[in-house]
Image (cartoon, rainbow, N blue to C red):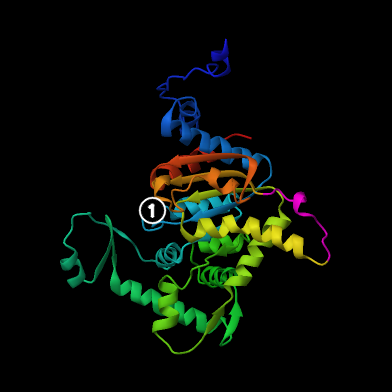
Amino acid sequence: MKHKKYLHTPIASVPVNKRANIRDVLLSMSKASFQGRQLGEALLVWEEMLDKGCYVFMGLAGAMVPAGMRGVIEWLIREEKIHCLVSTGANLFHELHECIGRHHYKGHPDMDDVELRECGIDRIYDTLAHDKEFLDDDRFILDFSRRNFEKGENVTTAEFFRRLGKYLKNKGKKGFIVTAYEKAVPIYCSALGDSSYGIALAAYTDERIINFDIIQDARDLGKLIIEHPKTGVIYLGGGHPKNFIQQAEIIAAQILETSPRKKRKRDEINEGHLYAVQISTDAPHWGGLSGCPLQEGQSWGKEHPNAAMVNLYCDATIALPLLANALAQKRG
């Protein structure tokens, strides 16, 4: 009768129902197999972390904003489905590009890139943008920085984007940087220099307008862990956003151990994120962070030993809109 230990939950056939909404479909998929099940279970884990009152971090990597995901990110922030955003500088630059009234355009992956270069057009797979507009965006960043910071001021990236959100709001602009400012959701970018923000502040002037304190960013993220013992994470891809959030657990533990007051012991925090969803197209066997399964983080103390985790191998431009709409359709 040993087989009963394993053979207890039959796979359910996914029904077709013209009255079903997206959430209904994803819940039915959670009872099927393969990445369909993982997509459904990702919804269940995300809902549970919110129901349990977790502070939710999102790591945003990949060209999500040019691909049309900015509205989804804005909704997640506005509706408090995430509480802290760690992003690549590129996504934050492309968000600024759209926020101030510019666009990304449909293209094709087989276009002639030499001809595009001659036309002053930049390509991101099947998406296009006007290079001159990007250069204008750089000048916008430079002008904003000169107006809103003392020369040589030390600031965190979170403070930079807080002021940028306020500046854009005062100009009547809308987007997720503005919504994050309105909702007091911090935005961190631990590799800001590796983006057009870095280009704007490095290439157009010899001034040291801003000194970014990345180490204070790391401390502040660790303090958020301490302040919120129950945390959940949503990772779109990997890269520095994922690792920056992952290492915050280690920083939090070290802060508690070395604090002279020792108000709280290490075992009084969650010893890792309690809930985790990762959406990636990278395979784990190459050893890269983007494909690294969440279970591996348990060996580092980054995910809780009993964490509810889902590794979803899917293009985030497919999975994220489905998950967000399903979250929106939950009642109660």
* 270 part of magenta stretch: yes
Q: Which residue occupies the extreme top position in the image?
A: 1
Which quarter of the image is occupied by the C terminus? top right
Instruction: Give amino acid for label 1.
Output: Gly
Q: Residues within 10 Å of mark 1 (few under 14, many from 20)?
A: some
Magenta span: predominant SS is loop
Residue 329 in sight: no
Residue 293 in the image, given as x and y percentages of width and height = 49, 45
Give above or below for 198 relative to 58.
Answer: below
Residue 262 in the image, given as x and y percentages of width and height = 82, 61
Q: Which residue occupies the extreme bottom position in the image?
A: 206
Residue 282 in the image, given as x and y percentages of width and height = 39, 48
Residues 255 and 203: in front is 255
Give above or below for 145 relative to 189.
Answer: below
Q: Mark 1 points at which residue?
A: 68
Residues 327 and 64: in front is 64
Give above or below for 313 relative to 9.
Answer: below
> Is 203 situated left or right of 293 in this image?
left
Tell me the residue at 68%/40% (across/down): 52
Residue 72 in the image, given as x and y percentages of width and height = 47, 50
Tell me the residue at 37%/58% (across/down): 66
Location of residue 126 (image quadrant) = bottom left
Which quarter of the image is occupied by the N terminus? top right
**Which residues lie in the magenta part?**
261-271
* 296 part of magenta stretch: no
SS for dot 1? loop
Residue 253 in sight: yes
- Total number of numbered labels? 1
Residues 120 and 244: in front is 244
Tell me the residue at 60%/71% (across/down): 215
Location of residue 185 (image quadrant) = bottom right
